[in-house]
Amino acid sequence: MTSSETEHAGTSGKDLLIELLWRIGAFQFGEFSEGNTSKNSPIFINTKQIISSPNTLRTAAELVAAELEILQTRRRQNLSDYHFLAGIPLGGLHLATALSLQIGKPLLYIRPPRIPSDLAEPPYLEGTYRPGQQALVVDDLATGGTSLRETTITLRSLGIKVSDAIVLIDREEGVTKKMEEFGVRVHALITMSYLARRLIENEHISLETYELIQAYLNMQKGTTL
């Protein structure tokens, strides 16, 4: 896929990415619960599968880069200038690394605790930064927003400003509203609503599965109002 094909992160580019994710088995259907937010979800989205396909990872990075360019030029939905990317381990870090190479921005990340005693130590940030600089947080999948919030808290505690986050897929489970209240705008390349529409249009899922996903999304919207 060339850069021209993904220019402006258009629908054709997003549709191609969804198809690539489908082919590598990133979507599973049934009944899944994960964390405190996703309960009895009819779809499981494993975006970490992109590391098994360099073409899929490269396409994702190109599309996110194009989306960032759009956001920086829009009048109503601004994206703050940023000095570096902050990838959320582990899935977000894979995407952030590819994105860093794509747009030429430095990358940093918070090193996860390796042993229990590490939890008592101050957070360790891998990468070079100066207090007062701005970070763009990058993650592969947004669910309840816990990882985004914790990463933002840690970065801010180290003097790093955070105003925006970009995610590959938003499960639409209230993360946008939660993070807005925390002073962070969450921008998503693909929403679960869009994903479901494309899956049924491409005959990857049945009407019954599509309706289950829609019902789940409606329920999530009701719980976040």
Image: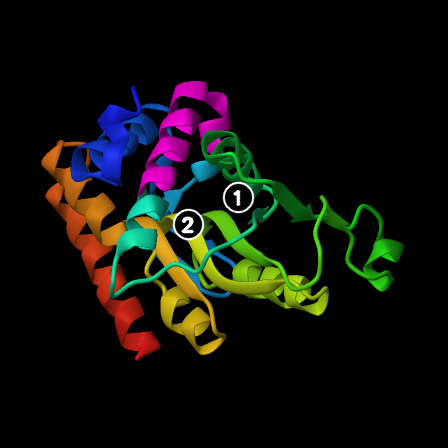
- In terms of depth relative to the viewer, which is nearer, 52 or 67? 67
Find residue 201 and report its horizontal and vertical position in percent. 10, 37
Q: Quadrant of residue 121?
A: bottom right
Type of amino acid under label 2: Val
Q: Main secondary structure of the magenta part?
A: helix
Q: Residues within 10 Å of mark 1 (few under 14, many from 20)?
A: many
In which quadrant of the rendered image does the N terminus lie? top left
Q: Identify which residue is drawn at 21% across, 54% down.
A: 212
Find residue 14 and report its horizontal and vertical position in percent. 25, 37
Find residue 143 and report its horizontal and vertical position in percent. 43, 58
Pointer 1 residue: 92
Find residue 174 and report its horizontal and vertical position in percent. 37, 68
Q: Secondary structure at mark 1?
A: helix
Residue 149 appears in the figure: yes
Q: How is the image coloured?
A: rainbow
Q: Identify which residue is drawn at 50% across, 49% down.
A: 138
Residue 57 magenta-drawn? yes
Pointer 2 residue: 167
Q: Identify which residue is drawn at 55% across, 66% down.
A: 149
Q: Residues within 10 Å of mark 2 (few under 14, many from 20)?
A: many
Type of amino acid under label 1: Gly
Q: Which residues are magenta?
A: 49-66
Residue 203 magenta-drawn? no
Q: Is residue 85 left or right of residue 173?
A: right
Q: Is residue 51 left or right of residue 78?
A: right
Q: Quadrant of residue 221?
A: bottom left
State the separation of the CA atoms marked 2 and 1. 8 Å
Q: Earlier in the sequence, mark 2 or mark 1?
A: 1
Q: Are marks 2 and 1 in contact (CB under 8 Å)?
A: yes
Q: Secondary structure at mark 2?
A: strand
Q: Is residue 185 left or right of residue 108?
A: left
